Amino acid sequence: MRLSRLIVLLVFAVAAVPAALILGVTSLSTRRVLLANARELARERAERLRLRLADQLASTQRAIEVAARRPGWPELSDDARREILSSLLAQREEIDVATLFDPAGHPLPGMQAAAPALPPGLRERHLEAAAALLPDLGKAAWSPVHRAGDGHPAATLVEALPGRLARARDDGGEATAPAGFLAVEVDLEGLQAIVSRQSLGNQTQIAVFDGAGTLVASDGPFGAALEGDGGRGLRAALADARRSLEGAEGRGPDDVRIGSYELPGGGPALGAVGLVPSTDWEVAVLTPRAAATGLVGRVQREGLVALCVGLAFAALLGILFARRVVGPLRQCVAEALDVSRGIFGREIRVRRRDELGDLAHTFNYMSKQLYAYDSETRGLYESLERGYLETMVALANSIDSKDPYTRGHSQRVADLSVATGQRLRLPDRTLKHLLYGGVLHDIGKIGIPERILGKQAVLTEDEMRIMREHPVIGAAIVSPVGFLAPSLPCVRSHHERWDGTGYPDRIAGVEIPLVARVVNVADTWDACTSDRPYQEAMSFDEARAVLERLSGSQCDPDVVRACLEALDLWRAEGRPAVASEPRKRAAHG
């Protein structure tokens, strides 16, 4: 993996892992806190609601008790009794009907007061509810909740009237038998206002049920669903809560229990259930679990947004840091590669005061030292090379000096070879090899007998065979010199022909080293334009025609073309392009 990618990934991971852990821990902690708060808030609301409902019911019950316990009920006239009933309705607006019953539980004729515009059927419901509680009633009692004609919840409260008749008690004593009963129809719509004022919002459901499981009042999105079968599951859970509250050791009926419940229509809820004091009514305050923990989702969303922004910033920071680190390293690698190629003295321009700056400073110091050592070594090498070359040139000159016709031949071949190589766009190192090879291409003639080398006539077949050994002799002389190894093909193969009929190895085409092909063309040109015992020097155009004729048979066509271009350039510059001019020789003839 690239270092820059690794740095970016590391910075990204360093930023992402702690942020993700913090987000996860925060979400879990927030969820626990929200659930605990929802339970506690539900408990407080349930406790407050059940006490307010108890106060409201107790207030109504106290007003009825005051009326029922008035002394002398048996002696009162019918008008007085009706006045008491009417005043009771006037004092308490929640009372719709008030009825007197005899001790046997039968309604007394004409002893009933009712509010104006009474809903239809309410009187009958009132009498039925009272009859269900009578006659065996020892204390005030509430009937199950029922619905009035206008749909309002209502209940019948029955209170015994004190009498003077004595009766035997189970313990042998005497008790006062009731003189009759007072039954009132109480409209419970006012309880709905108390419930609504306790609303928590946030989809919280508040419900009040009587002992039979009938809905008295509710507030929240599930109000209608709590009626009938929709609220059966919740009512069953409330019944279990009632039994646990009333039956657990050390607990009383006024306790509130916190737990988990199932909402109408499904879905878990957190809430509290309590019993209304002095009644068998139940109060439930429920909050959907999803609503109670809804803030967690918001925290998670905002946290994810913050996490993404942080990770983007971390990635950007990682990229910048990677560039700051990798940039100098890349420079160092590039310069080190140049140094490995022998280009010394290169410097890394990094102005930093850290480890990378120290690395760049150390590299620059090393490069300068290598440059100094290289300059010194190059000087020694060039001096040694020059010494070798001067020795070889001296040998070549000694050979040329044996034949006045070939004096200067080696140097001219070397110069033309270099010029041809330049037209072929050969690198400087190869041009140097051409220079050495051109100077030394005939060095092997030092091993050829002088009688053959200096013969002024055409050589015989045997003499030619001996003369053709000079490339091999020259190669043997040059091969021990290491720095002349690239020039060795010029010495051994400069008489090889393009068509494969040359010597000594009879190789053809591109199998012939390029430097040897270049020296071959230059050698041929100088031979054509030099005076030889067996021929007179040709003119420029004559020699050009010969080279063009030999192109493709003896000589490489591309090299011939480059050589002629070099000669044309020499001629344009006024440099000598031929070894001897025929006209000058004729003038001295």
Image: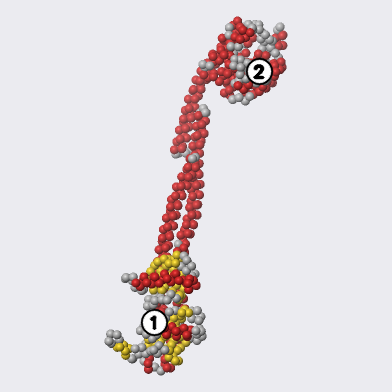
Tag 1 secondary structure? strand
Q: Quadrant of the C terminus?
A: top right
Q: Earlier in the sequence, mark 2 or mark 1?
A: 1
x, y percent for residue 546: 70, 16
**Relative horizontal placement of residue 547, taking residue 357 as reference (left or right):** right
Q: Any mark on residue 556, and which?
A: none
Q: Amino acid at mark 2?
A: Gln
Q: Label 2: which residue? A: 554
Q: Quadrant of residue 565?
A: top right
Q: Is residue 372 above or below residue 172?
A: above
Q: Is residue 265 above or below residue 407?
A: below
Check disc 1 and report the residue beneath it: 141
Judged left or right of residue 373, residue 497 is right
| Near-viewer residue (497 or 5) | 497
Spot the residue most to the top. 451
| C-alpha gap between disc 2 and disc 1 | 138 Å
**Is residue 68 in view from this perspective?**
no
Give the percent coordinates (x, y) of residue 574. 68, 19
* Residue 396 percent across, percent down from the top left: 58, 12
x%, y% of residue 14? Answer: 45, 47
Task: Please tell me which residue is depicted at 41% across the width and 83% down the height of the picture.
Answer: 132
What is the basis of the colouring in this image?
Answer: secondary structure
Between label 2 and label 1, give the one nearer the viewer. Answer: 1
Q: Residue at image x 36%, y 70%?
A: 244
Callout 1 amino acid: Ala
- Identified at 49% across, 57% down, the residue is 301
